Image (cartoon, rainbow, N blue to C red):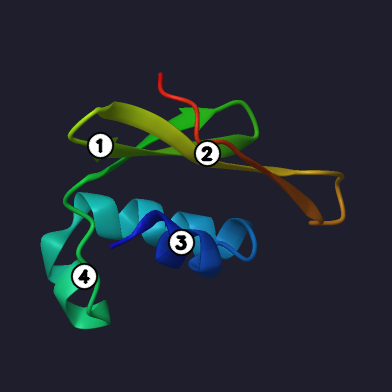
Amino acid sequence: MSPERLTSLLTDLDSAAEVVDAIDNRDLQRQRGWDLTRWNYDLIPWGVRFTYQSGEGASVIRTVMPLNQRGSFIEYGSDQNM
């Protein structure tokens, strides 16, 4: 899955949790028609960071975390190599 496609899926923390589950479960990836073989995630305090493994190294693509207790969220994007 391209970084642009994954970014479009990350609309809230629930969708980020679905992607995390799918990264760990190839059957779930197949059910959803996703190929997440180049993707990794890191659980960070109050959120998750997604990284993409390209031929040139890993890039942080998106970090999703809550903005407040009401379930709002913020996203940070980056294309810097780690």
SS assignment at label 1 = strand
Q: Residues within 10 Å of mark 3 (few under 14, many from 20)?
A: few
- Residue linked to disc 2: 48
Q: Earlier in the sequence, mark 4 or mark 1?
A: 4
Q: Nearer the viewer, residue 28 or 82?
A: 82
Residue annotated with mark 3 = 4
Task: Check disc 4 and report the residue beneath it.
Answer: 28
From the image, tell me which residue sits under label 1: 53
Name the mark nearer the viewer: 4 or 3: 3
- Dot 2 amino acid type: Val
Q: Quadrant of residue 53?
A: top left
Labels 1 and 3 touching (C-beta < 8 A): no
Residue at figure coordinates x 86%, y 47% from the top left: 69
3D distance between C-alphas at marks 2 and 4: 19 Å
- Labels 2 and 4: the sequence-earlier one: 4
Identify the mark nearer the N-term, 1 or 3: 3
Q: Secondary structure at mark 3?
A: helix
Above or below: residue 76 compared with residue 72: above
Query: Mark 4 or mark 3, which has the lower sequence index?
Result: 3
Few, some or many residues within 10 Å of mark 4 (<14, 14–19, 20+): some
- Label 2 close to label 1 by CB (< 8 Å): no
Identity, as a three-letter code, of the amino acid under mark 3: Glu
Q: Position of residue 57 (x, y in %)?
A: 26, 26
Quadrant in the rendering for residue 41? top left
